[in-house]
Image (spheres, rainbow, N blue to C red):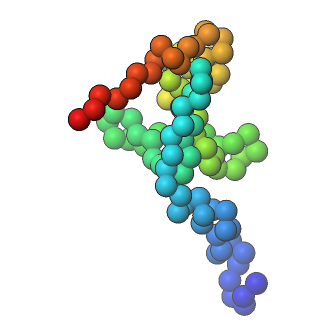
Amino acid sequence: MMAGRSQAGFKSSAVLSFARMTPTITPKVNGPLLVQGPVRITAPDGTEIPVPPRKDGTPAQVIVLCRCGASATKPFCDGSHQRIGFDSSAASSPAPRP
């Protein structure tokens, strides 16, 4: 450690590499949307919605968003898609071509 600098003054390489990632959204079959990379989630009025931390208290590096509409923690997934038998094939359709 450098003299005069606390360990808190340094970011881990995992945090730095996460900050440089390109955001990626992956729909899971019959499940939620997985969002990887640095993103901000905002409400319709523009206020930021805090992302819940992981169970161990560290910041989430993957955000899991509901796409079945049944989550009690919208916009985040709470696993309700399993309870209601969500079928993602009925929810998705190809994007129209320009």
| Residue projecting furthest to the top | 84
* Whether residue 44 is situated above or below residue 90 in the rendered picture: below
* Quadrant of the snapshot with the N terminus: bottom right
Q: Residue at x 61, y 44 (%)?
A: 62
For residue 10, side relative to residue 21 (left or right): right
The answer to whether residue 51 of the structure is visible from this angle is no
Q: Is residue 61 above or below residue 80?
A: below
Rendered view: 16 above or below 9: above
* Residue 73 location (% of width, % of height): 56, 25
- Please give the name of the residue rendered at 46% of the width and 17% of the height, measured from the top-left corner: 91
The residue positioned 62% from the left and 10% from the top of the image is: 85
Front residue of 61/51: it is 61
Labels in figure, total: 0
* Closest to the observer, 51 or 91: 91
Where, by quadrant of the figure, is residue 76 drawn?
top right
Residue 67, position as x, y percentages in the image: 50, 23
**Quadrant in which the C terminus appears:** top left
